[in-house]
Amino acid sequence: MPTDTASITPSRHLFVWAGDADGKDSDFLAVLDVDPKSPRYAEVVATVPVGLTGTAHHTEHSMAEDGHLFANAFSAGATFVFGLTDPLHPTVISSFTNVGDYTYPHSFERMPNGNVLATFQNKGEGNAESGGLVELTPDGELVRATDAADSAVPDLRPYSLGLVPKLDRVVTTNNDMRAKFKNSSIQIWRLSDLTLLATLSLPPGPAGLEQFYPAEARVLSDGHRVMVTTFSCGFYLLDQLDTDAPRLQLVLSYPWEKWEHECSLPVQAGDYWVQTVAVSKIQALVSIDISNPENPREVDRLVLGSEDIPHWISIEPKGDRIVLTGDGTLAGRVLLARINRETGELELDRSFRELNAEVVGVDFGRKEWQHGATGAALPHGTVFSRP
């Protein structure tokens, strides 16, 4: 059963970064009404095109207080900053590609000072050189930057990041978006001056595969420990970050065989870690109790269709709703799930559907949008508005 929502102020809107399906028209940000009491519930209420095609990728994982949202267009090496203080009239505030020598930005996190810390995969064009960490203003202007290159570990490609302000640390994962290099490293930085402190290799697990393709780094509720996941479905607990000997241990894994299947994005809901798992025999959202992060245990599983490939999830601030997009037969749809924050139980929100629709969710396979008749789109990065 879902959490009792009586005391929760729901988010009113969902911001969906979508790519034009046939690559002929502009990608765009769509605004969906997700207020359960609204007469326009599950409707697309606004869109804003960006003038670039076929590139929509990740956004920030949650909506910032300033109403700005960074959205990545990786294959074009570009990023757009959307202004969303008025959700019914979204705007493009700015955009950028390279910042100095740093190219191909990927992930973004808000710093305690209000700026944005970003991973850039490369320096220079192509995929020849490691990138680094770049601090940006909320409008995308350069503040400072530092290299990820480490002579002891070649072919580093900064991917995602987790900030640990209590310990003055940043943890980044390394994964090559172009899939040329087979990474298994993470890096630890000092947050205050972006000094690179260590490059660590993830230890192999029983299958010898768990360490490959580091994905996401998330700070746990204690503010000291970090869970690092890999696309090859390994879960690593990182602690002792403020010492000269940080500790990495594999605490959980799911069976993984090949790159076509993967464990992608997670979210946290109190003591529960919700993970997208798309491997040969599992297509699901999995809820994992991490109250003891050294011994996590699965408590529930929202099983999806056999051809559904879950990829992106984001959680409603202080709420119980989780938005889901993906590939396979999930491509072109936006779904909502709910988590019981007391038990970790998951269920599909079957009330989230368009008027008179037989299929759950919102279908992006339509012909018409507010910005024109540009046809079907593929949603990717998606976040809830702040309540």
Image (cartoon, rainbow, N blue to C red):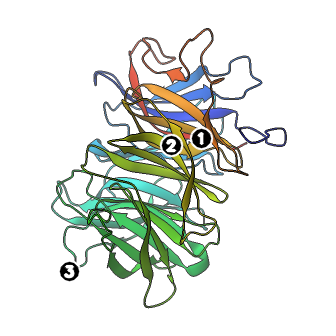
Taking depth in this image into account, of 223 and 32 the one nearest to the observer is: 223
Taking depth in this image into account, of 21 and 243 the one nearest to the observer is: 243
In which quadrant is the N terminus drawn? top right
Q: Position of residue 247 (x, y in %)?
A: 44, 82
Q: Nearer the viewer, mark 1 or mark 3?
A: 1
Q: Which residue is mark 3?
A: 151
Q: Position of residue 78 (x, y in %)?
A: 34, 46
As helix, strand or loop, the secondary structure at mark 1 comes to strand
Residue 25 in which image quadrant: top left
Badge 2: few (under 14), some or many (20 or more) residues near its Cα, within 10 Å? many
Q: Residue at x 79, y 39 (%)?
A: 5
- Dot 3 and dot 2 residues touching (CB under 8 Å): no
Relative to 270, is 375 above or below?
Answer: above
Q: Which residue is mark 1?
A: 322
Badge 1: few (under 14), some or many (20 or more) residues near its Cα, within 10 Å? many
Q: Residue at x 70, y 38 (%)?
A: 11
As helix, strand or loop, the secondary structure at mark 2 comes to strand
Is any atom of residue 191 visible in this view?
Answer: no
Residue 285 is tagged as: 2
Q: Residue at x 15, y 61 (%)?
A: 128
Q: Position of residue 331 (x, y in %)?
A: 39, 28
